[in-house]
Image: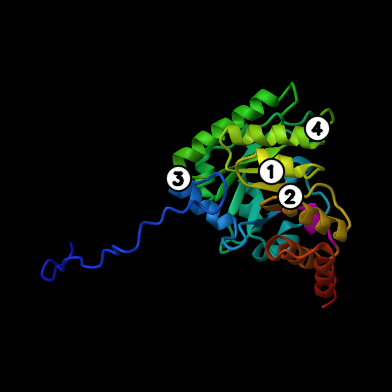
Amino acid sequence: MADLDDIRDGDNFGLNSPANTDSFYLKGLNSASWGIKNRMSRIFNRKSGRTVMLAFDHGFLMGPTSGLERIDIGIASLADHADCLMATRGMLRSCIPPDNTKPVCLRTDTGTTILTEMNHNVLIDEAEVIGMNAAAMAAMIAVGDPATEASTIANISRLVDIGQKYGIPVMGVTAVGKEMARDSRYFGLASRVCAENGASIVKTYYTEGFENVVACTPVPVVIAGGKKLPELEALELAYNAIQCGAAGVDMGRNVFQSDAPLAMIKAIGGVVHDNLKPQAAFELFNELKNS
């Protein structure tokens, strides 16, 4: 109980300082809960308003793909240089030291692999998300896939229900299949569906006309790195997306399959947070690679 012997009346009410009613620094989230905003503030740099997410969740579909054979060796050393880690619960528990304090975007859907028909996913238990101290939850939607569109959108909706209950943001990940067009019209549709169903972040692919995708999506959009590109091309991809309004990148193969992963993630950070142009970032990459 507070000491009652020395109670002093308040006398500094800041009468000349109006209450701060500024909007939250990330678009579309001014009405979000305190918990969601707090977790988003851990993921997105408050100075640049952007993020470099390091994705290494590929194994739940692909197994030990190149660069992910030993996550405890290849990824753990990169973790401190990302703003956020995107991974599955198994790899976090077994390969990432728990004293790493980087926020985690936990892959919360699981189901099929590259050996079978894709996208038939279900959600992991919400207790796992809380137990893993996740800053965000990620799940995929397969817009345009007749077999799985409804179930994957239902997964996102259910995940948002969980997120609203516990103050955890959801990242909707737009899938691309063989029958899905890879253009701004499709990605704009898929990204908007994520946001319409309550996602706080959307992960999608860069394409020509990407500024329209960002404009029609009222929450932060981060781009997927996709397949491995030469380093300069990957830096150009990140730069072009940022110029179109992307709030960051969620890259995997273009980092961990690089000849110099540590140099690459630092160069990407230069593009995302420091507005380095691709050539300058590529020079930084080579300087770090050779140092």
Pointer 2: residues within 10 angstroms few (<14), some, or many (20+)?
Answer: some
Name the outermost residue toward the top. 146
16 horizontally vs 10: left or right: right
Q: Which residue is labeled 3 in the image? A: 33
Residue drawn at x 71%, y 40% is 213
Residue drawn at x 87%, y 56% is 233
Work out whether residue 49 or residue 126 is closer to the camera in this orientation and state it. Answer: 49
Name the outermost residue toward the left. 5
Residue drawn at x 16%, y 69% is 8
* Mark positioned earlier in the residue sequence (2 or 4): 4
Contact (Cβ within 8 Å) of mark 4 with mark 3: no
Residue 105 at what x, y percent from top left? Answer: 61, 49
SS class of the residue under badge 1?
Answer: helix
| Amino acid residing under circle 4 | Gly
Residue 279 at what x, y percent from top left? Answer: 85, 66
* Mark positioned earlier in the residue sequence (2 or 1): 1
| Amino acid residing under circle 1 | Val
Residue drawn at x 62%, y 47% is 220
* Mark positioned earlier in the residue sequence (3 or 1): 3
Q: Which residue is labeled 2 in the image? A: 244
Asked if one can make out residue 69 in the rendered structure from this viewpoint, the answer is no
What range is drawn magenta here? 250-258
Magenta span includes 251: yes
Cα–Cα gap, marks 4 and 1: 21 Å
Q: Is residue 33 above or below residue 79?
A: above
Contact (Cβ within 8 Å) of mark 2 with mark 1: yes
* Mark positioned earlier in the residue sequence (4 or 3): 3
Question: Which label belongs to residue 214?
Answer: 1
* Mark positioned earlier in the residue sequence (2 or 3): 3
* Mark positioned earlier in the residue sequence (4 or 1): 4
Residue 1 at what x, y percent from top left? Answer: 18, 62
